Image (spheres, rainbow, N blue to C red):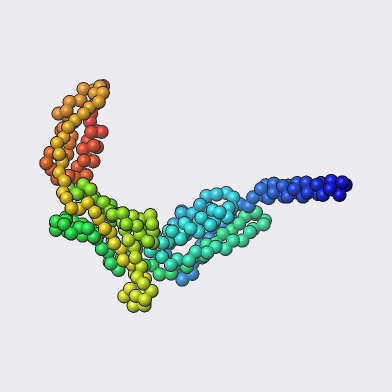
Amino acid sequence: MKNFTANILCCVFCFLAIFSDGLTAQEKRIETGDINFKFRQTESFSDAALLDILLIPREKYFNRINLEEDMQRLNKFYFDNGFFDVVVDTATSVNKDDNEVNVTFIIIENARYIVKEFRLQGLDKVPDNIKNEINSNRLVSAGTPYNKNNINLEKDRILGILQDNGYFFAQIDTVRSKIDSSRRGIIIGKFSEEMQKDPEYKNMVMVRMRFIGTQDVYRFGSIRFNIEKNDYDISQKVIAREIAFKEGDIFSKSKMIESERNFTKLAIIS
């Protein structure tokens, strides 16, 4: 019985000791120290630009989970800017005098991928004048570095042109990219390793956008007004004056938005 009691007391003591050590460790949380970047080979972005996307510099205390997430953020940032083969690593050192952890991000950018081909699909039935507008002032073209932001801006630019020329249902299709599943209908394709042995295809990508809803042109139909709780006695004539289109006009999303803005600018005297 005495041995059993002694064992229980020993376990309780060990538990209290461990718990006490845990409290001590929490009280001595290590702060985040200096954040540095070490580039091997090339350096395409400033330290300030990279620091801006990190979480660690904004937190007072060092957290290893935040460090791992910041590595992922850096990987995504470089990927979105065409560095598909980037390698990101870290090195940490503890400054016991200041109770700080200094962090160094080690970055090997490798090559930046260039757009070899930029294909637009689904525009076969679109008139030449609209195609010419689409093909002028492109944000993405063969020979430019891959950049996700420019890809999205180009998509929105083309959709804007289509939707201002009667293609009410124009949209990007629903095919998902194998490289980035969040990018619907835009395919980013790296050429095979065999093809990349040819300098013409080395570090090159093909970008494809497929559009749907480009078969039929729509026009504005009849225009009706329904004013609920017309406390300011606004006449339909006043509202009609602010509409930027009329029945029978080719549908234009910009004119519809312009009309909505005009409504918000109506002078109302209470």
How far across and how far down the image is residue 50, in percent? 46, 58
Can see residue 172?
A: yes
Left or right of 251 on screen, residue 6: right
> Residue 131 or 171: which is nearer the viewer?
171
> Residue 262 or 113: which is nearer the viewer?
113
* Residue lying at 27% horizontally and 64% vertically, measured from the top left: 118
User: Is residue 145 placed above or below 185 in the rendered structure?
Assistant: below
How far across and how far down the image is residue 114, in percent? 33, 67
Left or right of 3 on screen, residue 91: left
How far across and how far down the image is residue 9, in percent? 81, 46
How far across and how far down the image is residue 120, in percent? 24, 60
Outermost residue, right side: 2
* Residue lying at 42% horizontally and 61% vertically, measured from the top left: 78
Outermost residue, bottom side: 198
Left or right of 65 on screen, residue 168: left
Counting every numbered tag in the picture gives: 0
> Residue 79 or 42: which is nearer the viewer?
79
Q: Quadrant of residue 65?
A: bottom right
Outermost residue, left side: 248
Q: Quadrant of residue 122?
A: bottom left
* Residue lying at 21% horizontally and 22% vertically, measured from the top left: 233
* Residue lying at 61% horizontally and 57% vertically, measured from the top left: 101
Can see residue 149?
A: no
Instruction: Please identify the quadrant where the C terminus is shown.
Output: top left
